[in-house]
């Protein structure tokens, strides 16, 4: 019976150490997977931001062209009003 007690006394702390280190490595793996998923989400967010910026730039260019046309028309109307006076 003392042999069983001896084996249990030696085995339980060793098993505990193995479980602690195993859990530590599993937590590190889970943390690395979470970090990778987070990095991928940031990449997608950056791509969406770049696409939105390009779309905004195109819209701003179109508005600039339209404003140039409006300025030209207003100048023509002002000239016509000056000529009428």
Image: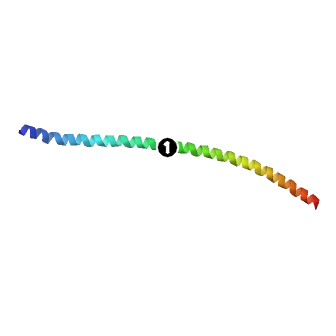
- Quarter holding residue 21: top left
- Quarter holding residue 74: bottom right
Mark 1 Cα-neighbour bin, 10 Å: few <14, some 14–19, many ≥20: few
Identify the residue at horizontal 8%, vertical 37% (top origin). 3
Question: Total marks drawn?
Answer: 1
Q: Element at badge 1?
A: helix
Identify the residue at horizontal 23%, vertical 42% (top origin). 17
| Left or right placement of residue 44 versus residue 28 in this view | right
Quadrant containing the C terminus is bottom right
| Left or right placement of residue 29 versus residue 62 in this view | left
Q: Position of residue 67 (x, y in %)?
A: 76, 51
- Quarter holding residue 11: top left
Identify the residue at horizontal 73%, vertical 49% (top origin). 63
Q: Position of residue 77 (x, y in %)?
A: 87, 55
**Residue closest to the far right:** 84
Identify the residue at horizontal 94%, vertical 59% (top origin). 84
Q: Position of residue 33 (x, y in %)?
A: 40, 40
Q: Position of residue 28 (x, y in %)?
A: 35, 42
Q: Which residue is mark 1?
A: 41
**Residue closest to the far left:** 1
| Left or right placement of residue 44 versus residue 34 in this view | right
């Amino acid at each position: 019976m003392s042999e069983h007690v001896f084996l249990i006394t030696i085995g339980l702390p060793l098993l505990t150490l193995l479980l602690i280190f195993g859990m530590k490595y599993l937590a590190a793996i889970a943390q690395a997977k979470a970090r990778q998923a987070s990095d991928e989400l940031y990449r997608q967010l950056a791509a969406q931001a770049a696409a939105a910026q390009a779309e905004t730039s195109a819209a701003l260019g179109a508005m600039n062209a339209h404003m140039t046309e409006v300025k030209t028309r207003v100048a023509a109307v002002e000239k016509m009003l000056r000529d009428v006076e």
